[in-house]
Image (tube, rainbow, N blue to C red):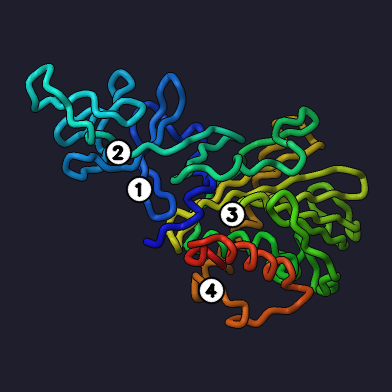
Amino acid sequence: METSALTHHWHPIATGEQIGEQPRRFTLLGEDLVAFRTERGVKVFLDLCIHRGVALSLGFIEGGILRCGYHGWAYDETGVCVDIPSLPKGSPIPSKARAIVYPVVERYGLVWVALGEPASEIPAFPDDEWDDPRYRAIVSQQYTWRTSAGRAVENFMDISHFPYVHEGVLGSRDNTEVQKHEVSTRNGGLHYFLEAPEPADLHSKPGDVVRWEYFLTGPFTIHLRKTVPSGDVTLISMAASPTTETTTEMFLWIARNHQLDPSADAEFIDFTHGIMEQDRLVVESQRPEKIPTDLRDELHLKVPDASGIAYRKYLAAIQGAAAYMP
């Protein structure tokens, strides 16, 4: 596989709760990883024992040490092999006997990994909503879609499908025209907004003019801030983790400055789940799963597709990202 600059970006592989004291396999950018939790936090290795190439995720943890389930080679948290049971006690261990270890950070309820030296920070929330006490913020859902990460994000960015895919929920066929809007760069990502009336939903009335504001904060991390006339704000956010070129693990967050009681979470989760399922059926039907990076290879409309055009240009500038583009 082509070495990609995407390895220098942070991508989530799991929620914090999904990683426990025993090893578990995950996949990112086509690489199999093994993750486990110690007293000092989560550790992530390449899922490969240097001895005979067995998956370390088939092994087990004892005393904070990851032991291969094939010949018992044991690796400490830094990846150094500290025990080879088949050698006499006290025998020297080859210096090359070590696992490949990756940078890992827990933030926003997720476990983030970079397969190369990180080139930037974890993609942040637009206005730090996750840590803002005025907001109720949760990890809401997780999905596996049969599509590229770029496809998943481009769909999230697109507003012109609302009247058709989400009719009566986010849009109406009585109002299909997309207003002209400017897609600008912001903090190394993209930003744009539109204002349009929508049908009633969880916290708006029919005909309310809603502000839809989008923030792309990383190659595959995006936030949608929805503001209604009352001032209520709901932030729906997604990190699309590129497991392979045609499969994506998607993590959703919901943050809101209204209906703050946790008992309201289920209503918001159910609402967004319905929307995501409508999107999944459409996105997984798209062919090919990977569209060529050359904008001339698809038909684009200047105004309705402004965000998609800007996003494709943004990804095309990242070396090696073509395989994961929309």
Q: Earlier in the sequence, mark 2 or mark 3?
A: 2
Residue 1: x and y in percent read 37, 61
Q: Earlier in the sequence, mark 1 or mark 2?
A: 1
Q: Are marks 4 and 3 in contact (CB under 8 Å)?
A: no
As drawn, the label of residue 32 is 1
Closer-to-camera residue (174/149): 149
Q: Which residue is mark 3?
A: 220
* Residue most extreme to the front: 95
Tag 2: amino acid:
Ser
Task: Determine the residue positioned at 51% across, 54% down.
Answer: 6
Residue 295: x and y in percent read 62, 77
Nearer to us: label 2 or label 3: 3
Q: Are marks 1 and 2 in contact (CB under 8 Å)?
A: yes
Closer-to-camera residue (170/193): 193
CA distance for labels 1 and 4? 25 Å
Nearer to us: label 2 or label 4: 4
Q: Earlier in the sequence, mark 1 or mark 3?
A: 1
Q: Which residue is mark 4?
A: 291
Q: Earlier in the sequence, mark 4 or mark 3?
A: 3
Tag 3: amino acid:
Phe
Q: Which residue is mark 2?
A: 57
As drawn, the label of residue 41 is none
Task: Determine the residue positioned at 65% across, 47% down.
Answer: 270
CA distance for labels 1 and 3? 19 Å
Residue 148: x and y in percent read 51, 63
CA distance for labels 2 and 3? 27 Å
Left/right placement of residue 186 relative to residue 77 reads: right
Residue 292: x and y in percent read 53, 75
